[in-house]
Image (cartoon, rainbow, N blue to C red):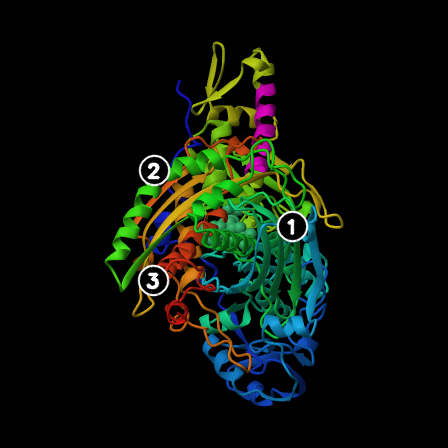
């Protein structure tokens, strides 16, 4: 009997057809209870102020309004900060800290009524001076958390003795998640004051915890369920809780179900984004371009509260080396407090910003020395046996970059194309081309060690069908199908025998956010552990009932066999049930080997590294400043991929999202602190027209995780985003070529047409 190959095969996303036919259920698609009420929230239109008075009487008198809510109506803690910061209220107390901050909420018979009524509030402010940018925050020493320093060797000494030295800076802009499904929650009152919350969150356990805290109830009074999100990208790691709390408090106050769905503009104004960074560097290097000493100073916009800024800023520091050995290095990180919405997780979690810094440095060195930047990249790559210790003193043992870079250099025809581009540019004054090659190394694990745990719950019913549940959430990335594949493979049943079910805090408790790209690594292991427990019981049962040796029992192709004995999986399930064998089990996993000491900035924060590389060729129009990606070649090490089709989708999507961040997506506040890019009319995300014309995406065939991860696969969710840094480098090259070729243009990110034109006219 042939084995069923459920893993390492390209299986379509379980919801693909449902997504395109509209049959996938999102929170706002669920049947509405007949007594459902809708709510909305009113926000501040000033960036920093004391609230002198808030008069909601006209709001309350508006026909169809049921009641209002302010901070005082929240029975428990008026707090939405994750972890233990206590620095972010659900609804402002007396202090307004950013324009767009929720101040009060309105409950009404319809969403339209609630939104209309919100406008009738009369609020008096005493304005305070706002801090709206990173520089001002640095000047005023306005921080959400204390600065951090990471150090290896002696960067000062190395800088002073280096034959060449360069100083510079780069600003990387923020990014709006622009998930297609906005933030949404529906809370349904249950018996005894309990609450069921249906929401769109990467972190149901945290929503459960925060809702319970705001209601002043124990965690077991709240149940949170997430079937899927219509995209999240880090924007629903902490940002869903506020809206869930507002609906839960209203539901609790009125004993009626309550729904809240954010309008796109409000979603953009009132929820967190990627951190913008100001990065200063000071680098010393030899005549071949080898880095001898380097100092980075990161300053990032965190907005009004810590949220996840600490670990995000840390991850930026952890990735300030990217793929390169830095022997003498100091990285300092300032976590700036500003009067703008609190910044949050976004795909890469600070890693991309840290990597833009070092990639910029490498380009700067190459331009100074007149070398091909790829040559400088290669010479600085981590070594295999030496030159392989990171700035946080972890030895890189799984470096595949030398081999992967060589493979991509050949398959992309880099060297030949670089020459062709030079030739093209000689005869093309207006349209100019550039090409760049960027490797990426990304650490996999949560850098907060205790978050690296996951659990699952598996039932086998007496007809042999399987019910699968785990702590991970689906946001489009294909986590559910991958875990189902793993469980189906373990039982050796057809994939359609495994039922994918909504993430639910009542089934699997105390989970971590689905984040850090570790969803499959962790939940896959936990689900397999649960399946193995059930298998073990079935094996004992078969051995005892049919007098066969335990070691002979094999699960294969919907059957269980042992020598002469053979039975279908379904029949065995029925027999085991009759034999009073438990067919339900939980599984648990904690990532091994990881530890980190922030005091000495040393340890092993990551179980392993994911690697990839990209070559991007771009074209700019020197009259309009527009750019486009003509061709991108990507090679990504997904280990032994559980599902290559899903992984290719992640690589393509991540790269294009990264290209959007670096070229067209610009977040812009005016001098009063109003976000002026709060709709697709002013904020440009990539569309299908922005995908590279030639897009060669490959999973590296030699990939295999040297750590014992699930089926030796590697994480894929975030790292491909960083491969888009090659697009920015290539644009720099196209501009530099136009300007004469010797100096690296002062091009920040995003490289919008305006920014490109500014660089060109700076000549
Ligand atoms: N892919 C889709 N389609 N939608 C998303 O929201 N989020 C990304 C990535 N890929 C995202 C996505 C982010 S930020 C992370 S951390 C990972 O998916 C999380 O899922 P994983 O751990 O299962 O890879
Ligand atoms: Mo992803 S930024 O870790 O949610």
Residue 448 versus residue 271 in the image, above or below: above
Kindly identify which residue carries mark 3: 738
Q: Position of residue 166 (x, y in %)?
A: 56, 57
Please identify the dominant SS of the magenta region: helix
Report the residue at 46% width, 42% height from top: 612
Mark earlier in primary sequence (2, 1)? 1
Q: Position of residue 253 (x, y in %)?
A: 64, 72
Kindly identify which residue carries mark 1: 161
Contact between marks 1 and 3 (CB within 8 A): the answer is no
Q: Nearer the viewer, residue 635 or 417?
A: 417
Classify residue 606 as left or right of residue 439.
right
Classify residue 431 as left or right of residue 588.
left
Residue 461 versus residue 121 in the image, above or below: above
SS at badge 2? helix
Label 3 neighbour load within 10 Å: few <14, some 14-19, many 20+: some
Q: Is residue 536 magenta?
A: yes
Spatial CA distance of label 2 from label 1 is 40 Å
Q: Position of residue 650 (x, y in %)?
A: 43, 47
Mark earlier in primary sequence (1, 3)? 1
Q: Which mark is residue 392?
A: none
SS at badge 3? helix
Kindly identify which residue carries mark 2: 411
Q: Which residues are magenta?
A: 524-541
Q: Position of residue 302 (x, y in %)?
A: 61, 66
Mark earlier in primary sequence (2, 3)? 2
């Amino acid at each position: 009997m042939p084995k069923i190959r459920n893993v390492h095969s390209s299986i379509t996303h379980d919801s693909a057809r449902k997504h395109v036919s509209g049959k996938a259920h999102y929170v706002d698609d669920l049947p509405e209870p007949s007594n459902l009420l809708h709510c909305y929230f009113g926000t501040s239109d000033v960036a920093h102020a004391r609230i002198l008075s808030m008069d909601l009487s006209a709001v309350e008198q508006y026909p169809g309004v049921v009641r209002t809510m302010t901070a005082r109506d929240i029975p428990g803690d008026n707090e939405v900060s994750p972890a233990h910061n206590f620095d972010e209220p659900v609804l402002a107390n007396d202090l307004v800290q950013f324009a767009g901050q929720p101040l009060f909420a309105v409950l009404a018979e319809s969403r339209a009524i609630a939104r209309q009524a919100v406008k009738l509030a009369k609020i008096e402010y005493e304005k305070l001076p706002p801090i709206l940018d990173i520089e001002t925050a640095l000047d005023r020493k306005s921080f959400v958390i204390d600065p951090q320093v990471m150090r290896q060797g002696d960067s000062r000494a190395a800088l002073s003795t280096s034959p060449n030295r360069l100083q510079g800076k780069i600003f990387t802009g923020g990014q709006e998640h622009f998930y297609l499904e906005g933030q949404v929650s529906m809370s349904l009152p249950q018996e005894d004051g309990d609450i069921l919350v249906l929401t769109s969150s990467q972190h149901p356990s945290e929503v459960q915890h925060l809702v319970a805290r705001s209601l002043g109830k124990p965690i077991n009074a709240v149940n949170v369920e997430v079937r899927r999100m219509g995209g999240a990208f880090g924007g629903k790691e902490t940002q869903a809780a506020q809206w869930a709390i507002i609906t839960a408090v209203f539901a609790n106050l009125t004993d009626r179900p309550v729904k809240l769905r954010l309008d796109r503009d409000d979603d953009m104004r009132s929820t967190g984004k990627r951190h913008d960074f100001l990065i200063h560097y000071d680098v010393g290097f030899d005549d071949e371009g080898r880095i001898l000493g380097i100092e980075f100073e990161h300053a990032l916009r965190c907005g009004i509260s810590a949220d996840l800024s600490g670990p995000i800023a840390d991850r930026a520091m952890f990735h300030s080396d990217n793929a390169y050995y830095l022997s003498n290095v100091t990285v300092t990180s300032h976590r700036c407090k500003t009067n703008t919405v609190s910044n949050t997780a976004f795909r890469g979690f600070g890693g991309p910003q840290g990597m833009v810094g070092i990639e910029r440095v490498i380009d700067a060195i190459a331009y100074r020395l007149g070398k091909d930047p790829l040559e400088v990249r290669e010479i600085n790559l981590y070594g295999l046996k030496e030159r392989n210790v990171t700035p946080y003193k972890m030895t890189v043992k799984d470096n595949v970059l030398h081999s992967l870079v060589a493979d991509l250099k050949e398959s992309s025809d880099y060297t030949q194309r670089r020459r062709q581009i030079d030739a093209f540019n000689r005869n093309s004054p207006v349209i100019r081309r550039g090409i760049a090659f960027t490797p990426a190394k990304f650490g996999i694990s949560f850098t907060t060690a205790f978050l690296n745990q996951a659990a699952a719950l598996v039932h086998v019913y007496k007809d042999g069908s399987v019910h699968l549940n785990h702590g991970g959430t689906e946001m489009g990335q294909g986590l559910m199908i991958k875990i189902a594949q793993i469980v189906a493979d373990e039982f050796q049943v057809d994939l359609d025998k495994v039922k994918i079910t909504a993430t639910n805090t009542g089934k699997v408790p105390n989970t971590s956010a689905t984040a850090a790209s570790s969803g499959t690594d962790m939940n896959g292991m936990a689900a397999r552990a649960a399946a193995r427990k059930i298998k073990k019981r079935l094996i004992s049962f078969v051995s005892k009932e049919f007098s066969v040796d335990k070691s002979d029992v094999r699960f294969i192709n919907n059957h269980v066999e042992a020598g002469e004995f053979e039975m279908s999986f379904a029949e065995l399930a029925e027999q085991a049930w009759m034999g009073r064998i438990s067919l339900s089990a939980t599984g648990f996993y904690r990532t091994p080997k990881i530890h980190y000491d922030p005091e000495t900035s040393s340890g092993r924060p990551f179980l392993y590294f994911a690697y990839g590389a990209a070559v991007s060729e771009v074209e700019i129009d020197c009259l309009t400043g527009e750019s486009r990606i003509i061709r991108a070649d990507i090679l990504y090490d997904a280990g032994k991929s559980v599902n290559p089709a899903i992984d290719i989708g992640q690589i393509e999507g991540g790269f294009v999202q990264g290209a959007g961040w670096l070229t067209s997506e610009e977040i812009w506040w005016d001098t009063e602190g109003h976000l002026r890019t709060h709709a697709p009319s002013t904020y440009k995300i990539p569309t299908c027209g922005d995908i590279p014309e030639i897009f060669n995406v490959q999973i590296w065939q030699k990939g295999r995780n040297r750590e014992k991860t699930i089926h030796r696969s590697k994480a894929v969710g975030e790292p491909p985003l960083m491969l888009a840094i090659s697009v920015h480098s290539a644009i720099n090259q196209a501009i530099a070529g136009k300007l004469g070729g010797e100096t690296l243009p002062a091009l920040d990110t995003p490289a919008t047409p305006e920014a490109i034109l500014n660089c060109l006219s700076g000549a």
